[in-house]
Image (tube, rainbow, N blue to C red):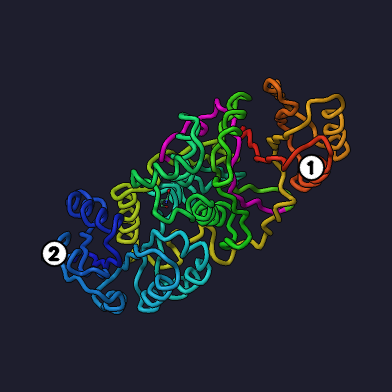
Amino acid sequence: MKPIKVGLLGLGTVGSGTFTVLRRNQEEITRRAGRGIEISMVAVRQVEKARAIVGDACPVVGDSMLVVDNPDIDIVVELIGGTELPRQLVLRAIANGKHVVTANKALLAIHGNEIFKAAQSKGVMVAFEAAVAGGIPIIKSLREGLTANRIEWVAGIINGTTNFILSEMRDKGLDFATVLKQAQDLGYAESDPTFDIEGVDAAHKATIISAIAFGIPMQFDKAHVEGISQLQAIDIQYAEQLGYRIKLLGITKRTTKGIELRVHPTLIPGTRLIANVEGAMNAILVQGDAVGASMYYGKGAGSEPTASAVIADLVDITRLAAADPGHRVPHLAFQPNSISQEIILPMAEITTSYYLRLRVADQAGVLADVTRIMADLSISIDAMLQKEPAENESQTDIIMLTHQTQEKNVLKAIEKIEQLATVFGQVTKIRLEELS
Ligand code: HSE
């Protein structure tokens, strides 16, 4: 059988990894796919630079449209990043009857509904294993391996940059800005790290996970997005003293009122396996009603780990290219006519536990005032830590962990607590998940 022909858009970190791994493992991949997979055209901005990698294996062009319009190409692999240009290229490739593989989480979280609809009507596949957690096969696990389950929740460390920063802050007691600078100098963090540190990258991935876990459309605009740039080293230390680690989690959860979709720093019991995922590694914990908890761990970024996911998609498409569209694995795991319109809950309606840090006057009655406010709002306290004031200081920190409560109750309590004359500055609030 003739090899399937692939057009590659972008030859950066992931593109060059894809090229290298496909070439290195060609024989084994062909045995698995049933036919060869051949990169037959590459489009890049810097054509000369790309030729140094590609050699004379295939033509290298500067115009991506030449790839998506090339009638000989069966699958377009989009690895250029951004959203608007990829959207146009992917839609055009689909309109031309080509299958698409993409690692672009922003593209799918924002334009996925439009893209999957177009793909459905043209009977082509859009595969995106590389878009979430790099080399970890979480899309395949959710969409196929766990298909028997009613998924209850998914919680993941799905951004390596922020996990690296948090690990360093904890290990070395350094503040956020210092570690970010080090991460940039070492090349771990982008020179513009905004998407990573502000939780946007994780929210794109959580949006995709949420859609697949619950059979709902992509709804990035409804996701709560909070990064780690405001996190203080002192809260990491207090959390440790209470037996918790702080991680940036992407969480999506089914509740009786709707679906929670949120990214924020989260306290996790230090004994949980996921709390011990350190450095730039990723891990995703899935709770299904039949399987219970299962965890997926690995490299969430990097050239060959991400290429591993891109090529897995190429093999899937190669195997299924001849199958009729109605019998392929649906893009969002659920059949298109069974996508649910269940709502994503506003953040005020979510239920979780909280870590609260207050700066207070060290005098009689302060704690009573604070706990009265919390009791009036039915917020139950789970644990408390009060630091002895430093010598010559009349203020101290109180740290409280709450039992589960609704976010709106905590927001009201914080508003009232901050009005107390004996409480100084703002209350620090970090959500806490037991993940049990
Ligand atoms: N920037 C991402 C991370 C990798 O730090 O995990 C690509 O999604």
The residue that appears at 86% across and 24% down in the rendered structure is 364
* Distance from the alpha carbon under mark 1 to that under mark 2: 66 Å
- Residue identifier under label 1: 418
In the picture, which quadrant includes the N terminus?
Answer: bottom left
Instruction: Point out residue 345 in the picture as x, y percentages from the top left corner.
Output: 70, 55
Instruction: Point out residue 175 in the picture as x, y percentages from the top left corner.
Output: 51, 37
Q: Earlier in the sequence, mark 1 or mark 2?
A: 2
Corner quadrant of residue 68: bottom left
Identify the magenta region: 258-281
Does residue 55 appear to the left or right of 257 in the view shown? Answer: left
Q: Residues within 10 Å of mark 1 (few under 14, many from 20)?
A: some
In the picture, which quadrant includes the C terminus?
Answer: top right
Is residue 320 or residue 415 the one in the foreground?
Answer: 415
Instruction: Point out residue 142 in the picture as x, y percentages from the top left corner.
Output: 49, 48
Q: Label 1 amino acid? A: Glu
Does residue 220 appear to the left or right of 181 in the view shown? Answer: right
- Report whether residue 178 is seen: yes
Magenta span includes 266: yes
Labels 1, 2: front one: 1
Q: Residues within 10 Å of mark 2 (few under 14, many from 20)?
A: few
Magenta span includes 202: no
Does residue 235 appear to the left or right of 125 in the view shown? Answer: right
Is residue 32 or residue 273 the one in the foreground?
Answer: 273
- Residue identifier under label 2: 57
The residue that appears at 31% across and 59% down in the rendered structure is 314
Does residue 385 appear to the left or right of 173 in the view shown? Answer: right
Q: Label 2 amino acid? A: Ala
Question: Element at badge 2?
Answer: loop
Is residue 44 or residue 173 the one in the foreground?
Answer: 173
| Farthest residue, direction front | 392
Q: Is residue 416 above or below residue 83?
A: above
Instruction: Point out residue 235 in the picture as x, y percentages from the top left corner.
Output: 61, 34
